[in-house]
Image (cartoon, rainbow, N blue to C red):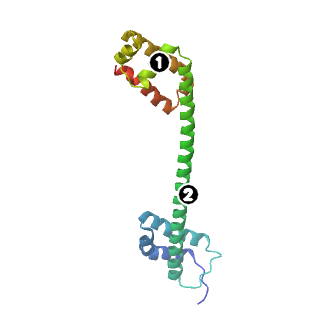
Amino acid sequence: MKEMRITEKQFEELFELYYEELCRIVFPILKDRDAAQDVVQDVFVKMWLRREELLITTSYKAYLYKSVVFRALDFLRKKKNDLALKEELKIGYRHFQDADTTLEQKELRDAIALGMERMPEQMRIIFHLSRFSSLKNREIAEQLNISIKTVESNLSKALKFLSEHLAHFSKNSTFKTICFFLMGYLLNR
C-alpha cells in the first residue's frame, strides 16, 4: 500500500466519518464516555499536528482504530499509575499526620503533667481526682474533708492555671479537645 499524507479536507471528512464510531469502540475499554471522547479527540489532534511528517501505510480507518485503542490503553495505564501514586501519597500523608499528631499529643501530655506539677498540692490533688479519677465534687469534698465550695474554687483555679500554662497549644485541635474534656466536668457538677 502506498504512503498517504492527509489534507485539511480529508482530515475534516475523517473526523466527521469516524469520530462517533471511534468513541463507541473506546467506550467499552474505558467505561467512561467523557474519557472516550477525550481519547478520540486526542488522537485526531495529534494526527492533525503531525500531519506534515505523518505517513500512513494502512487505511485511515485502520490507522485511527489502532491509534484510539492504543491511546485508550495508555490512558488506563496512566490512570492506574496516578491512582496508585495518589494512594501512596495518602498513606504517606496519613503516616506523617499520625506521627505529627502523636508528637503533638505527647508534647501536650508532657505540658499538662508539668502544669499539674506546678500547681499547689491541694489544687493538683483536687484536679486529679476530678479529671482523672472521675469523682464528683461532693465525693472529692468528702474524701478530702473540705467544703464543696473549696473543691469548685480549686477546680476553677486549676483550669485557669492550666489554660494559661498551655496557651501556646491553643491553635492545636488536640488541645481544644483536651480542654473540652478538662472543662466538661465543671458543667456536669
- Residue lying furthest right: 53
What separation in Å lies between label 2 and label 1 (alpha carbons)?
Answer: 52 Å
Q: At which x and y percent is residue 157?
A: 47, 14
Q: At which x and y percent is residue 185?
A: 38, 23
Vertical placement of residue 187 versus 10, above or below: above
Q: Amino acid at mark 1?
A: Ile
Relative horizontal placement of residue 142, taking residue 76 as reference (left or right)? left
Q: Which residue is mark 2?
A: 85
Which of the two residues, 74 or 184, is positioned nearer the viewer here? 184
Tell me the residue at 53%/51% (across/down): 91
Pick whichever of labels 2 and 1 is earlier in the sequence: 2
Dividing the picture into quadrants, the one containing residue 143 is top left
Tell me the residue at 52%/77% (across/down): 64
Vertical placement of residue 148 versus 18, above or below: above
Which of the two residues, 76 or 37, is positioned nearer the viewer here? 76
Which of the two residues, 4 or 153, is positioned nearer the viewer here? 153
Give SS at disc 2. helix
Q: Quadrant of the C terminus?
A: top left
Tell me the residue at 56%/26% (across/down): 111
**Residue 125 got which mark?**
1
> Mark 2–mark 1 contact, CB under 8 Å?
no
